[in-house]
Amino acid sequence: MRLRAAALASACGGVLHGADVEVDGASNDTRSLRPGQLFVPVVAERDGHDFIAAALAGGAAAYLTARPPVGGTAIRVDDTAAALLSCGRLARDSLPDRVVGVTGSVGKTSVKDLLAAALAGTLRTAASERSFNNELGVPMTLLGAPDGTEAVVLEMGARGAGHIRRLCEVGRPTVGVVTSVAAVHTELFGSLDEVAAGKGELVESLPPSGTAVLNADDERVAAMAGRTTARVLSYGDSGEVRADQVACDDELRPSFRLRTPWGSAPVGLAVRGVHQVGNALAAAAAALACGVPLDAAADGLGRAVLSPLRMDLQRTQSGAIVLNDAYNANPTSMAAALRALAALPGRGRRIAVLGPMAELAEPACAHAEVASLAAELGVEVIAAATHLYGPDPAEDPVVAVGPLGRGDAVLVKASRAAGLERVAEALLST
């Protein structure tokens, strides 16, 4: 979205230094910054202000700064992260009413990807990149929406009470999707009821003319219908938008008949895992709430591609399957991934290289339950960087897996900090 630097400075209460240039989008990372964008230096483990010169050299049109300007077009502010939120609010003013917020303990990134595809055949759509779902990602998604955008999909994450409410104040969604309430970030929230309270901030923010898309099969999500004045559209086995005739091919790609109040349509997904059917139902419901015709939504779902490191199925030279699901992990997504691994055809070995699941209130119990499910499914667990699954962690998981042949399959999964995608890459290169 093209905005003038002076307008951004006014929106965030900053002082403009230099020319009133045009800015198109925003980035806080010089490695991915595109020419013409606003650079947002964030103070974290490293101070982004130290990279302003590199951002200007890389083509940044302007930058926010809490330090004295160092040349170019600068917007001097007290707090760059707070200023970015204000810039996001300004961008939202130029966008249409079709803004969809997506949250939930599990599945929100997949729903975001599926929904963006379901909308894109009918509406010019902008969506959060990867899992940019926090106080930086939401305003950057709004600022990055191209001129002429007709629909926006905002993934919204939360690490505590009030987080989603603040994101909604910036993004002002008119459609809100809540996928699930599960034991994720319980170390931060405290309990499942508090997780539900945090996720429900999305439906509380919707206008009366909006739509809350709720998972009818999750009792805590279904109960959120009483927390909104918006229309409620449910999905799931007991919902208004549901699936029947569900099947999976030999590479775990589901197909089903989509049943809705608008009629029915066949759907064949390119994404993997039968658990993606529920995510596709959420996306279909939100697309229909945005006015997309049923057939167009169904066709779009079939073209969806998930963000990286999510149920990415590849084969080794020997013909073994590697399921790279290493982006993140929690008890619910671990169970879904293990069941997908066990459902693969063939009689070869089934191995799961599993790393730690982070931010759990009772980590020992949660990891033990995952290990128990793996044993029940006949899956061998190789632990990586944690003792919580029972066996000692492998010094080198690739060596522990050993030679792989046709018919064998390996799942690689852990919370983001573990970086287990390196294991998946190494397995594919053997």
Image (spheres, rainbow, N blue to C red):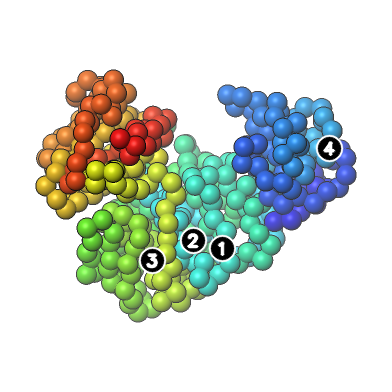
State left or right for residue 195 relative to residue 15. left
Label 1 or label 4, whichever lies nearer to me, is 4
Q: Report if the CB atoms under discs 4 and 2 are less than 8 Å apart.
A: no
| Of callouts 2 and 3, the N-terminal one | 2
Label number found at residue 116: 2
Q: Hey, what amino acid is under mark 1?
A: Thr
Q: Within the image, what quadrant is residue 277 found in? A: bottom left
Q: Within the image, what quadrant is residue 18 found in? A: top right
Q: Residue furthest bottom?
A: 263
Report the residue marked by disc 4: 72
Q: Report if the CB atoms under discs 4 and 3 are less than 8 Å apart.
A: no
Residue 142 percent across, percent down from the top left: 63, 53
* 150 or 360, nearer to the observer: 150
Label number found at residue 1: none
Secondary structure category for the residue under label 1: strand
Report the residue marked by disc 1: 125
State left or right for residue 338 relative to residue 150. left
Number of labelled discs? Answer: 4
- Calculate the distance from the C-alpha at mark 4 to the C-alpha at mark 2: 36 Å
Secondary structure category for the residue under label 2: helix
Quadrant of the image containing the C terminus: top left
Instruction: Give the vertical position of 374 relative to 227 (above or below).
Output: above
| Of callouts 4 and 3, the N-terminal one | 4
Label number found at residue 302: 3
| Of callouts 1 and 2, the N-terminal one | 2
- Calculate the distance from the C-alpha at mark 1 to the C-alpha at mark 4: 32 Å
* 131 or 76, nearer to the observer: 131
Q: Hey, what amino acid is under mark 2?
A: Ala
